Amino acid sequence: MKNLLSQLFSHKMEFAEQGGPLHAPGASGGGTSQPNGLFSRFLTGLDPMVPMVVMAALVGCVGAFSVELFRKGMAVLIHLYSIHGHLVAAARELPIWMRIVIPTIGGIGGGALMCAGRRWIKSPHGPEYMEAVRVGNGILPLGPNLVRTVSSLIGVSGGITIGREGTMIQLAAVSSSILGRISKADAAHRRLIVACGAAAGFASAYHAPIAGTLFVGEIILGGLALREISAVLVAAIIGELTTQTFFSTGPLYISHVVPTVGFPDLIDASLVGLIAGLFGPVFLWILHTANHKYQAKVKFLPLRMGLAGLAIGLLSAKCPEVWGNGVSTVQSFFSTHWTLSALAVVFVLRLLAVTCASAAGIPGGVLTPTLELGGTIGMLVGCRLLIPSADHSQTLWVLVGMGSLLAATTHAPAMSAIMVFEVTHNYNVVLAAMPACVIASVVGSLLRHRSVYSEALGLGKGMHATPAPPRQAFPSRSPHQGDSHAHHHQAE
């Protein structure tokens, strides 16, 4: 396999490291001999995207297994203290003192591992997948990423209110980066291979291959470059097919079917989008401010993460729904009628818990917690202003709220609208979610120009990566562009 990958990339997929056209060996000057053998001549005649698609399919499969490995690790750790597989169910069954102690232990344990890793590994900091694609050279070092992955695994398995999916995507991207190095691909192709790994990880984590492709296109690549997106789409589809075939089937959430959406629903959806668009920048400001103030005051990492775990544990003593990334709470929105007071309590306490976890620097992401907060906004607006009269109406406003707040924080409306369709297989919701997501994205970007991901790229420190082209990492037989430097900070 290693020799085959090397052949695929050596014959038709090499860029000059400092710029230059895509070329085949022997294609220009100097009396270089033409390639011998049927396979070599076949590779020489290929469009460079063909071997890239083959690599993308392999990346998709490897990415899905990486995500499942993290899931299995979580299941093992959770079963050390509970028979339940879901964190909220586990928290409900635990005595209050254990709800407080377990997140505290998770925070301290994750922080201690991070500290130990920084001492053991010569280069303790490594780029995140987004930085490796946008401003890096497509190399994700294994050591620092394994330390971050295990630290995140300990934290999220202990009920810390942070998204596990960010670490899953990072792990899939690290696996793809290893494949890129094995294949001896150049920097431009390594960047695209890592992008494919991120898409496969996203698709496997959320069962959303189209949203995973748009996530890479809108956020990571910074635009929809068709030659790149074809490989990314293959990786996402193979990742999801692998997950569905070997591990789990069906959508992420089970919900009532949303009937055909009418014009009155668009007006209501626009209201949800507007409210989410106003709250999104506030949410980002809270995370940003807490991050800088808290980390400056508490510098010792195990103490900082342990205090965050303690705060989350104390909040969960009042409301067990505080535990975890919010998937279980969103599922309950689709099947249970909530009172306004209960929704308000969950919203406020989870906002505080996410802020504590993010400010402490606990490895993970905020995408899934953002979806949960958005779903709560949709429920609050629906119950207070739109007066849902049926289960499918409640489902509609939860999904519209989820997509709207995600769009307000990521400035990626297409990805956000498609994602809320894919996580439930409720196609009709797209007609209401799309205008709501556009409104939320526009309002959010006007009030705060930088999205959660652009802030993550711009606020890091101490890590300079080899720069990437500004737009197209996989040009079509043309020189790739110059580069620029950026700093490291955790994104998703």
Image (cartoon, helix red, strand yellow):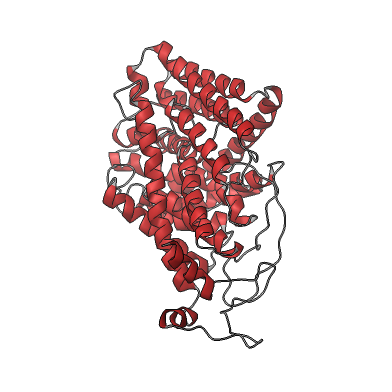
- In which quadrant of the rendered image does the N terminus lie? bottom left
Q: Can residue 75 be seen in the rendering of this structure?
A: yes
For image coordinates 65% across by 63% down, the residue present is: 469
- In which quadrant of the rendered image does the C terminus lie? top right
Task: Pick whichever, 483 or 310, lies toward us.
Answer: 483
Query: Residue 232 location in percent, x, y?
Result: 46, 61
Label count reads 0
When the figure is inspected, residue 216 is found, relative to residue 144, above or below; the finding is: below
Q: Is residue 387 left or right of residue 438?
A: left
Query: Residue 264 location in percent, x, y?
Result: 39, 50
Task: Pick whichever, 11 or 476, lies toward us.
Answer: 11
Q: Can residue 433 be seen in the rendering of this structure?
A: no
Residue 89 sits in which quadrant?
A: top left
When the figure is inspected, residue 492 is found, relative to residue 216, above or below; the finding is: above
For image coordinates 71% across by 27% down, the residue present is: 296
Query: Residue 218 location in percent, x, y?
Result: 54, 57
For image coordinates 48% across by 58% down, the residue present is: 196
Task: Pick whichever, 77 or 169, lies toward us.
Answer: 77
Query: Residue 51 location in percent, x, y?
Result: 45, 70
